[in-house]
Amino acid sequence: AQSVSQHNHHVILSEAASLELGCNYSYGGTVNLFWYVQYPGQHLQLLLKYFSGDPLVKGIKGFEAEFIKSKFSFNLRKPSVQWSDTAEYFCAVNWAGSYQLTFGKGTKLSVIP
Amino acid sequence: DAGVIQSPRHEVTEMGQEVTLRCKPISGHDYLFWYRQTMMRGLELLIYFNNNVPIDDSGMPEDRFSAKMPNASFSTLKIQPSEPRDSAVYFCASSLGRVGYTFGSGTRLTVV
């Protein structure tokens, strides 16, 4: 079965630190890739998505992600986190021929002021 | 655009009762998804529809769960009878093809 792995369950950072959250997916052909953020008690909001083209994707709130096809990875980055970035982050993949999103388990980010 | 609208936001019910969750997708979207989120299992796809037709219900946990989409602007997820292990947040999402997945605010279900 196709799967999505997020390596870190919980990341704790101080404000202004740099962030990188890992995401790997299983092989299955062409993919569309997404990162969603879920603030406490809220619904999932799209941060960024990759369909094709430039593998470095810029999203909202200063986030970016890089698609590395050879590594089946789509890591999320932010140069300098803020306290307001405290949330849970989900990587999601949609394989060609499928219309559903498969999610990773999520990474909880806590930013300490 | 009001986004994907789910109701109710919170539902507390007693074990054995029937529960109905509702979803209104974004107008023009042709796919509708029901997900369940728990601490233990994360986000799981329960079922999805294309143009109101159920396509894949392999994620529905058991026969107590059923979902319908009578028209393009409304879907329901029903649990009958409900059990404490059904307690979770249920999200509805809609999309246009494989792009633009948008999630609703979710329904937090507690079965006591």
Image: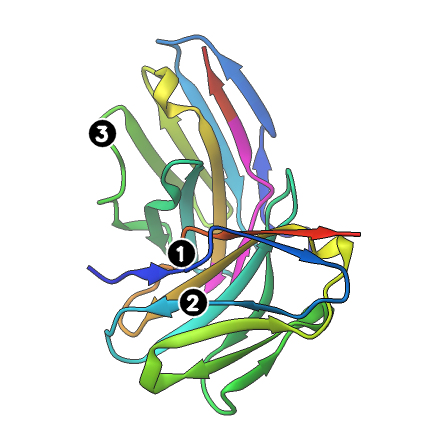
Query: Comparing marks 3 and 1, which lies closer to the viewer?
Result: 1
Q: Tags 3 and 2 in contact by the CB under 8 Å rule?
A: no
Q: Position of residue B33 (x, y in %)?
A: 41, 49
The mark that comes first in sequence, 2 or 1, is 2
Identify which residue, B55 or A52, lies in the foreground.
Answer: A52
Q: Which residue is mark 3?
A: B62
Q: Which residue is mark 2?
A: A23
Q: Is residue B33 magenta?
A: no
Identify which residue, B16 or A34, lies in the foreground.
Answer: A34
Please tell me whether mark 3 sits on a helix, a strand or a loop: loop
Q: Position of residue B50 (x, y in %)?
A: 35, 57
Q: How is the image coloured?
A: rainbow
Amino acid at dot 3: Glu
Residue A19 appears in which quarter of the rendering? bottom right
Q: CA distance from mark 3 to mark 2?
A: 31 Å
Assess disc 2: are there few (<14), some (14-19) or many (≥20) residues with their C-alpha within 10 Å of its C-alpha. many
Q: Which residues are magenta?
A: B95-108
Determine the main secondary structure of the stretch shown in magenta.
Answer: strand
Q: Is residue B97 magenta?
A: yes
Q: Tags 2 and 1 in contact by the CB under 8 Å rule?
A: yes
What is the quadrant of the N terminus of chain B in the image? bottom right
Residue B41 appears in which quarter of the rendering? top left
Please tell me whether mark 1 sits on a helix, a strand or a loop: loop
Assess disc 1: are there few (<14), some (14-19) or many (≥20) residues with their C-alpha within 10 Å of its C-alpha. many
Q: Chain of mark 2?
A: A
Q: Is residue A34 above or below residue A40?
A: below
Amino acid at dot 2: Cys
Q: Tags 3 and 1 in contact by the CB under 8 Å rule?
A: no
Q: CA distance from mark 2 to mark 1?
A: 8 Å
Q: Is residue A68 above or below residue B73?
A: below
Q: Which residue is mark 1?
A: A104
